[in-house]
Amino acid sequence: MGMTMTQKILAAKAGLENVRAGDLVECKLDLVFGNDITAPVAIDEFYKMGVTKVFHREKVALVPDHFTPNKDIAAAGLAKKTREFAKAMNIKHYFEVGRVGIEHALLPEKGLISPGDAVIGADSHTCTHGALGAFATGVGSTDMAAGMATGTAWFKVPEAIKVSLTGKKQPYVGGKDIILHLIGILGVDGARYCSLEFGGGVDQLSMDDRFTIANMVIEAGAKNGLFPVDDATIEYVREHGARPGTVYTADRDAGYIREIVLDLAQVPMTVSFPHLPDNTKSIAEAEKLGIPIDQAVIGSCTNGRIEDMRAAAAILKGRRVHDNVRCILFPATQAIWKQCVDEGLMNIFVDAGAAVSTPTCGPCLGGHSGILAEGERCVSTTNRNFVGRMGHVKSEVYLASPVVAAASAIAGIICGPDSL
Amino acid sequence: MKLKGTVHKYGDHIDTDVIIPARTLNDPDPKALASHCMEDIDTEFVTRVQPGDIMVGGLNFGCGSSREHAPIAIKASGIRCVIAENFARIFYRNAINIGLPLLECPEAAKAAEMGDVLEVDLDSGEVYNVTKDRRCTAVAFPEFMQNIIGAGGLVNYTRAKLQKED
């Protein structure tokens, strides 16, 4: 039997001709990274391993993006520990506040990930980088420590689910709607331990859409998500100064445990209701319920890229955020932030009565800068709506696209742009 | 190794945000984490749990964030092992890496109720529900993972491996 894209990358990185689903392999890593929450735990474990230096100072990245700018004294201590380790190890890719961005937007933007790479990150949304045709998966701090020490990690070669895209997506429908819809089909554990391998009509998806889709495959339990490398990928990689990498394609006779044909023409704007990402409804169903909101968050590693900011701005332009709503935007990197200035989006946001934050994960994980009180509801372009995720245990998060979040911010209830 | 303890039972898709909320991650000290373990779905867990107790979940236990703080919090709270119908991938990996034993045993997980007493043989994977007088066997770990568990976690395993390479 042939191999999937994921299997080919793992085989190459393990120095093997062939691997099969279920094999345990040890792979060489092209990048190991962590953030200000996961790296401090990894640093302690790293030293316990009896090592004094990282395997490669240019293949480890430290991105303090979660509790930064430091939310409190304890968080400042975590950021300091990360910073001091970066200095002690002479880490090239450490990003200080003012230069930092949300890791899964920043690392591709800085050209640190290429097609065919094997990447681990101590953050579950590391799967984002599968958009570039790389094998990228989230791990915990101890795996990050072992990766920093040895430049290797062990993996169980995953079984694969093929997602074939057909049809043409409808107006206002983007990567977020596609992945929420797919999670609704799969369920939050429908791809547990599997790779999700996308194919078919991916050429109509921008790189930003692909990052959004790959970002949330973990929400179906997947180990990684993978897009084929095409002209758009190659152009993105070139434009961002990354190595060209290695392009792998799935064998014709690769094995898949399930194949889903997703007709994009049938994918509506989609909202995930509390408290699991697979609790999806179409925007039409959601609108019927007339759900009032207190906050709209537009940003995160899922939807903080320039196309997301443009999509939100197109809805907010010439309109005002509803009196009952706090609308907060989080461009994911400094470059995106600056682009928002250059393109005039910042004026649109401010004129609409929205707040714009410096890049941070902030409220997505209930960290800071937009925490919800008891009974409050937020429409958010982030990736999780678990109990208590954005604040009080009795608050609610509705996951949606930047278009739906911006429209809802104006209407004060969950709705799409056609209802404004 | 054999364990005997009281069950703390939870449902399906227990995510790492409810195991240990992100607002508490600014202090990664295991004791501090343990003092907030499960508080968003079970405010009494931290006062009820006794050293040696056993946590039982349903499907996809530990889904969500990669935070290793989740198995650390569970372990530091005194829980000696977690039994579930199955586990989310990153949580499973993290627990093995830090030396928190897990058993994938759908039959035992479904049958167990809050307060039941279980006897668990980690070597054979046998789970005996003393309260209900039911016996079943968990899925065995692959040999490679048994080696990591045997070494006491990934830190020791990696240290030994690096020393061998030197």
Image (tube, helix red, strand yellow):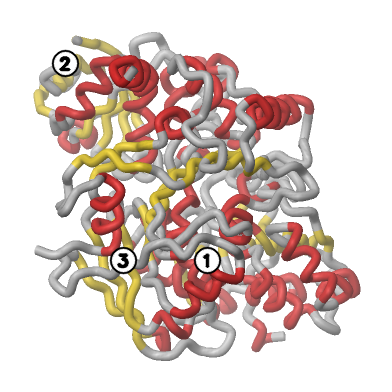
Determine the chain carrying the residue at label 2.
B
| Marks 3 and 1 share the same chain | yes
Q: CA distance from mark 3 to mark 1?
A: 21 Å
Instruction: Answer few, some or many: residues within 10 Å of disc 3's Cα (few below 14, many 20 plus, some between 14 and 19).
Output: some
> What residue is drawn where x is 71% and y is 77%?
A310
Q: Nearer the viewer, mark 3 or mark 1?
A: 3
Can residue A131 be seen in the rendering of this structure?
A: yes
Vertical arrangement, residue B147 with respect to residue A277, above or below:
above
Can residue A177 be seen in the rendering of this structure?
A: no
Give the quarter of the image for residue A179: bottom left
> What residue is drawn where x is 27% and y is 23%?
B148
Instruction: Give the side of residue A193 with respect to residue A71, left or right.
Output: left
**Front-most of residues B7 and A105:** A105
Q: Residue A165's x, y, as percent?
A: 35, 80
Determine the chain carrying the residue at label 1.
A
Determine the chain carrying the residue at label 3.
A
Q: Nearer the viewer, mark 2 or mark 3?
A: 3
Quick one: quadrant of the C terminus of chain A? bottom right
Tell whether label 1 touches label 3 (CB within 8 Å): no
User: Which residue is identified by label 3?
Assistant: A248
Tag 1: amino acid = Thr
Q: Residue B106's x, y, as percent?
A: 19, 38
Q: Nearer the viewer, mark 1 or mark 2?
A: 1
Tag 2: amino acid = Asp
User: Which residue is identified by label 2?
Assistant: B121
> What residue is drawn where x is 47% and y is 85%?
A204
| Marks 1 and 2 share the same chain | no
Tag 3: amino acid = Tyr
User: Is label 1 in a helix, a strand or a loop?
Assistant: helix
Give the quarter of the image for residue A306: bottom right
Instruction: Give the side of residue A133 with respect to residue A258, left or right.
Output: right
